[in-house]
């Protein structure tokens, strides 16, 4: 007999999501309208597919450069300079990764130390929390308030800072909240980071889906390049989630080590994903505009419908694929409400608590399913509300 | 000014390979014959390409199941049972990964603890060493001797065991050595692991390229399933290295945590890579046989040619894409010899020291370049030897 295989405590501390309860409830229902998924049910643009087929016809699927095709790094660098004012050396400050997910991990594992504290404005994307624990560091959730439009309160953030605070992690536009933090908030966050010598990790995967004025990228603000890691990718903008290509930009010295850890973990990013990413950079803007318009319309429809329910409040959607309405009027926990919606109304949603305890009382509703699913889901949600009185 | 961003010591301790010196020397040469690459210059089988094009035409590239398509897990499980006698529950004991590289990382990071010692028979694939350091553990290199045919000496391994020894990591067939450890060696290793309660991590990525009798998979030996993680993939067998799909099988309890870390790092494996992997499982055996035959012939040619050089010795190749000849007769370090070969002979090779200090005096020669490159490389190597007297 082998002794019990003792798992490294950093890793065994990573919680599994509660999503299983939802999935189990969902499995028993035959006809469910999907307001749950963050995985758009939409094909890649034809433009990308043509390029992919050419690459497949050429026949080769060899390892690429460990850190991503030089041409891809060069072009991402150029685009970041042009669109976000972020200046990054494509060899030393930019890495192509297995989506934002890998990028976040390799950066956090490289710059965090056991016991470091990481500020996470919350409700938050679960990965920021999980990765912090995976690095033996301590996530410090700082509540975002619905009444403030889920924009961070700088004083409250500052109060959470201790000598051990090392980094601030957030996404803009925000998953799950659907909000976009504007320039003045980012400037205050930049000031805070500089005053307390914090690193800033900003996930901009949803940036192409901003429905308000486009705010600056925090890494482009004065004094921020040296302390900011900016994460982005092609998954959401070009419906190529499964191809697993993202990137991160950061200061050269830490990126030297981040790149080496990336090599250990990934060897190289997927070759066909990189082909699609290069195609995405050539893709006519109209294609992107059309996707943008589609999601903007869907999110407006969802928001306008849900806010017709008496005593349901919801911060106006400004970006990404989600809204995060306050459903406390139903008098249930988020989890119980989500399960009732599956069982009694035939609509699947995510409890806000999937995004941390400050999500209690809320649901995350998404617009990633096909439009008819979305419409059916909305109708069922409204019907359920009507019955609940 | 930000303070210096202090890198986590586990990560800053990971060495970068010395390959840069080789690459720098190589960049100055216009006409180089490639005996260096582990990245076969060969297209994917047509069978896989057709399936990939169908998948691209279908148009979707959504996130897949986090742990790999259920059908792929099921079929890999069936194949492992049929071909290696490894019984693995496709939901609880098997994970689809971003190649063996990610699989090794997520397992090592989950089961190793700071200060643990990891036995690595050496010369070794650099990643085993790098990953051990990345986990804050200590790599313990145990020398493999050319005069033993690079088969491990069990007594010598046993002497290296301390109370902190936790795992043994090796690959079979072996990169860089080109040898295959037979059943009797694996049985002794299994006995050693059980006697000292060690985990065994075995990388079988080159298993389809075994040119001797196929040895068992160590995880299939009695008492080994509960302590063995078996790593494999499709990259080498089907020329789909860049598609980044591998897998790992291990005991359910640790795999539960390994899967969660995998989610944090990768979210899901690449969708098109998984399409190709499913196609690979349907691919006619003749296709594999042809590739196998091609590499077998190439490696024989390389071996027979190199061993005509007086006072060059080489263990007979039994698997993988490499030979690891002893080049001490040239009176140079491996690195100096490799650089001289680039500069004076127009042939690129890897110094044995890329695979640890016990590789000194050897070169790793590969057969991954096109056949005419291989033949040119061999001719130049022989010419260089002749001139050196």
Image (cartoon, coloured by chain):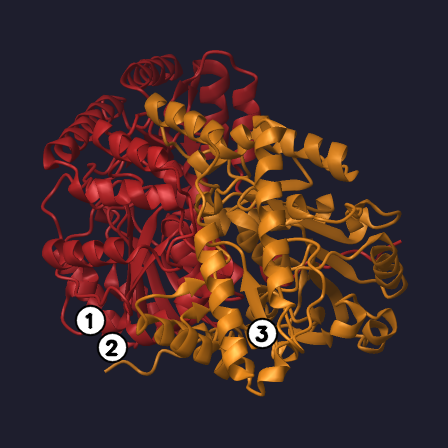
Chain colours: A orange, B red
Discs 3 and 1 share one subunit = no
Answer few, some or many: residues within 10 Å of disc 1's Cα (few below 14, many 20 plus, some between 14 and 19). Answer: some
On the image, the x and y values in percent for residue A180 come to 74, 56
- Distance in Å between CA atoms under marks 3 and 1: 51 Å
Residue contact between numbered discs 2 and 3, judged by CB atoms under 8 Å? no
- At 28% from the left and 51% from the top, the residue drawn is B232
Observer-side mark, 2 or 3, equals: 3
Q: Quadrant of the C terminus of chain B?
A: top left
Residue A201, percent from left and from top: 70, 57
- For residue A39, above or below residue A159: above
B254 w.r.t. B329: above or below: below
Q: Position of residue A157 (x, y in %)?
A: 81, 72
Label 3 marks a residue whose chain is A
Res B163 visible: no
SS class, disc 1: helix
Side (left or right) of B11 relative to B48:
right
- C-alpha distance separating marks 2 and 3: 50 Å
Task: Specify the quadrant of the image occupied by residue A353.
Answer: bottom right
Label 2 chain ID: B
Q: Which residue is mark 3?
A: A352
Say left or right for B290 vs B38.
left
Residue that carries the numbered disc 2 in the rendered image: B195
Q: Are marks 3 and 1 in contact (CB under 8 Å)?
A: no
Q: Quadrant of residue B143?
A: bottom left
Q: Secondary structure at mark 3?
A: helix
Pick whichever, B248 or B219, lies toward us.
Answer: B248
Residue ID at (30%, 43%): B275
Q: Count neighbours of disc 2 (C-alpha within 10 A) and say few if under 14, some if 14 to 19, many if 20 or more.
A: few
Q: Which mark is residue B191?
A: 1
């Amino acid at each position: 007999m082998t002794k019990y295989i003792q798992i490294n405590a950093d890793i065994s501390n990573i919680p599994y999501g509660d999503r299983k309860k939802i999935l189990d409830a969902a499995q028993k229902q035959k006809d469910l309208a999907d307001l749950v998924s963050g995985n758009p049910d939409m094909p890649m643009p034809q433009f990308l597919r043509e390029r992919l087929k050419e690459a497949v016809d050429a026949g080769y699927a060899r390892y690429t450069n460990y850190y991503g095709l030089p041409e891809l790094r060069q072009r991402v660098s150029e685009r970041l300079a042009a669109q976000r004012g972020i200046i990054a050396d494509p060899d030393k400050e930019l890495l192509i990764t297995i989506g934002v997910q890998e990028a976040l991990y390799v950066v956090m594992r490289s710059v965090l130390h056991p016991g470091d504290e990481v500020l996470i404005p919350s409700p938050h994307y679960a990965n920021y929390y999980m990765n912090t624990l995976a690095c033996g560091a301590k996530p410090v959730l700082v509540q975002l308030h619905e009444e403030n439009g889920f924009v961070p309160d700088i004083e409250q953030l500052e109060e959470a800072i201790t000598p051990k605070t090392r980094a601030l992690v957030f996404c803009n536009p925000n998953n799950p909240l659907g909000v976009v933090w504007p320039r003045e908030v980012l400037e205050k966050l930049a000031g805070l980071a500089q005053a307390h010598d914090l690193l800033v990790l900003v996930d901009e995967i949803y940036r192409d889906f901003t429905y308000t004025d486009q705010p600056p990228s925090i890494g482009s603000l004065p004094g921020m390049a040296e302390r900011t890691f900016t994460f982005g990718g092609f998954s959401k903008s070009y419906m190529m989630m499964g191809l697993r290509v993202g990137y991160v930009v950061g200061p050269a010295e830490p990126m030297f080590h981040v790149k080496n850890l990336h090599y250990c973990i990934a060897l190289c990013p997927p070759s066909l994903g990189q082909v699609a990413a290069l195609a995405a950079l050539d893709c006519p803007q109209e294609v992107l505009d059309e996707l943008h318009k589609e999601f903007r319309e869907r999110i407006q429809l969802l928001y306008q419908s849900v806010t017709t329910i008496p005593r349901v409040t919801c911060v106006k959607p400004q970006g990404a694929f989600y809204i995060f309405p306050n459903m406390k009027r139903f008098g249930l926990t988020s989890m119980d409400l989500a399960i009732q919606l599956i069982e009694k109304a035939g609509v699947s949603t995510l409890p806000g608590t999937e995004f941390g305890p400050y999500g209690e009382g809320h649901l995350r509703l998404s617009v990633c399913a096909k439009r008819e699913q979305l419409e059916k889901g909305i109708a069922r949600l409204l019907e359920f509300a009507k019955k609940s009185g």
